[in-house]
Image: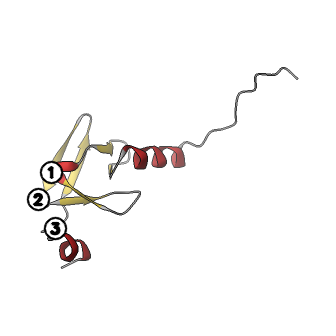
Amino acid sequence: MNRFERLFGLKGEARVAYLNGEYRVESPGDFVVCAVTGKPIAIADLKYWSVELQEPYSSAEASLKRHLELHPRRGRASGSTG
Protein backbone atom coordinates (compact mmCIF):
# COMPACT_ATOMS: atom_id res chain seq x y z
CA MET A 1 0.00 0.00 0.00
CA ASN A 2 1.45 3.38 -0.98
CA ARG A 3 0.88 6.76 0.65
CA PHE A 4 -1.93 7.75 -1.75
CA GLU A 5 -3.84 4.57 -0.99
CA ARG A 6 -3.56 5.19 2.74
CA LEU A 7 -4.44 8.89 2.56
CA PHE A 8 -7.22 8.78 0.00
CA GLY A 9 -8.48 5.20 0.06
CA LEU A 10 -7.47 4.81 -3.57
CA LYS A 11 -6.84 1.39 -5.05
CA GLY A 12 -3.88 2.22 -7.24
CA GLU A 13 -2.28 4.35 -9.90
CA ALA A 14 -3.57 3.98 -13.44
CA ARG A 15 -1.31 3.80 -16.47
CA VAL A 16 -2.66 6.18 -19.08
CA ALA A 17 -1.85 7.07 -22.70
CA TYR A 18 -2.46 10.77 -23.29
CA LEU A 19 -3.93 11.51 -26.71
CA ASN A 20 -5.19 14.66 -28.46
CA GLY A 21 -8.45 15.58 -26.74
CA GLU A 22 -8.77 12.28 -24.87
CA TYR A 23 -6.82 9.69 -22.94
CA ARG A 24 -6.83 5.91 -22.87
CA VAL A 25 -6.49 3.96 -19.63
CA GLU A 26 -4.02 1.17 -20.36
CA SER A 27 -3.82 -0.22 -16.85
CA PRO A 28 -6.76 0.30 -14.47
CA GLY A 29 -6.43 2.44 -11.39
CA ASP A 30 -8.16 5.23 -9.54
CA PHE A 31 -5.66 8.04 -10.08
CA VAL A 32 -2.58 9.39 -11.83
CA VAL A 33 0.09 11.61 -10.27
CA CYS A 34 0.61 15.20 -11.42
CA ALA A 35 4.01 15.54 -13.07
CA VAL A 36 4.52 19.00 -11.56
CA THR A 37 2.98 18.93 -8.08
CA GLY A 38 3.14 15.22 -7.25
CA LYS A 39 -0.50 15.32 -6.17
CA PRO A 40 -2.85 12.47 -7.06
CA ILE A 41 -5.51 13.23 -9.65
CA ALA A 42 -8.63 11.06 -9.69
CA ILE A 43 -9.18 9.67 -13.19
CA ALA A 44 -12.64 11.24 -13.21
CA ASP A 45 -11.05 14.67 -12.57
CA LEU A 46 -8.25 14.42 -15.16
CA LYS A 47 -8.50 17.44 -17.47
CA TYR A 48 -4.94 18.53 -18.26
CA TRP A 49 -2.08 16.58 -19.85
CA SER A 50 0.70 16.76 -22.38
CA VAL A 51 0.52 14.51 -25.42
CA GLU A 52 4.15 15.31 -26.24
CA LEU A 53 5.49 14.54 -22.76
CA GLN A 54 2.87 11.91 -21.87
CA GLU A 55 2.29 13.37 -18.41
CA PRO A 56 -0.76 14.59 -16.47
CA TYR A 57 -1.26 17.89 -14.62
CA SER A 58 -3.52 18.70 -11.69
CA SER A 59 -4.46 22.15 -13.02
CA ALA A 60 -4.01 24.62 -15.84
CA GLU A 61 -1.45 26.40 -13.67
CA ALA A 62 0.62 23.22 -13.34
CA SER A 63 0.44 22.70 -17.09
CA LEU A 64 1.62 26.27 -17.73
CA LYS A 65 4.43 25.89 -15.22
CA ARG A 66 5.73 22.79 -17.05
CA HIS A 67 5.42 24.57 -20.41
CA LEU A 68 7.43 27.55 -19.16
CA GLU A 69 10.08 25.23 -17.68
CA LEU A 70 10.54 23.56 -21.05
CA HIS A 71 10.15 26.66 -23.24
CA PRO A 72 11.70 29.61 -21.41
CA ARG A 73 11.47 32.97 -23.09
CA ARG A 74 14.54 33.59 -25.19
CA GLY A 75 14.52 37.31 -24.60
CA ARG A 76 11.98 40.04 -24.88
CA ALA A 77 11.19 42.08 -27.94
CA SER A 78 12.16 45.68 -27.40
CA GLY A 79 9.95 48.51 -28.53
CA SER A 80 12.87 50.96 -28.71
CA THR A 81 15.25 51.26 -31.61
CA GLY A 82 18.18 52.30 -29.59
Q: Which residue is mark 2?
A: 28
Q: Give the residue displayed 25% in from the left and 76% down from the top.
A: 3
Tag 1 secondary structure: strand
Q: Are marks 2 and 3 in contact (CB under 8 Å)?
A: yes
Q: Residue at x 81, y 22 (%)?
A: 80
Q: Which residue is mark 3?
A: 12
Mark 2 and mark 1 residues within 8 Å of each other at the beta carbon: yes
Q: Quadrant of the N terminus?
A: bottom left
User: How far apart, in angstroms, are the residues tagged by discs 1 and 3?
Assistant: 13 Å
Which residue is nearer to you in this view: 23 or 6?
A: 6
Residue that lies at the very extreme toward the right in this rendered image: 82
Q: Position of residue 19 (x, y in %)?
A: 25, 39
Q: Quadrant of the C terminus?
A: top right
Q: CA distance from mark 2 to mark 1?
A: 6 Å
Q: Amino acid at mark 1?
A: Val
Residue at which label 1 appears: 25
Tell me: residue 38, above or below residue 49: below
**Above-or-below relation of 26 to 4:** above
Cα separation, mark 2 vs mark 3, equals 8 Å
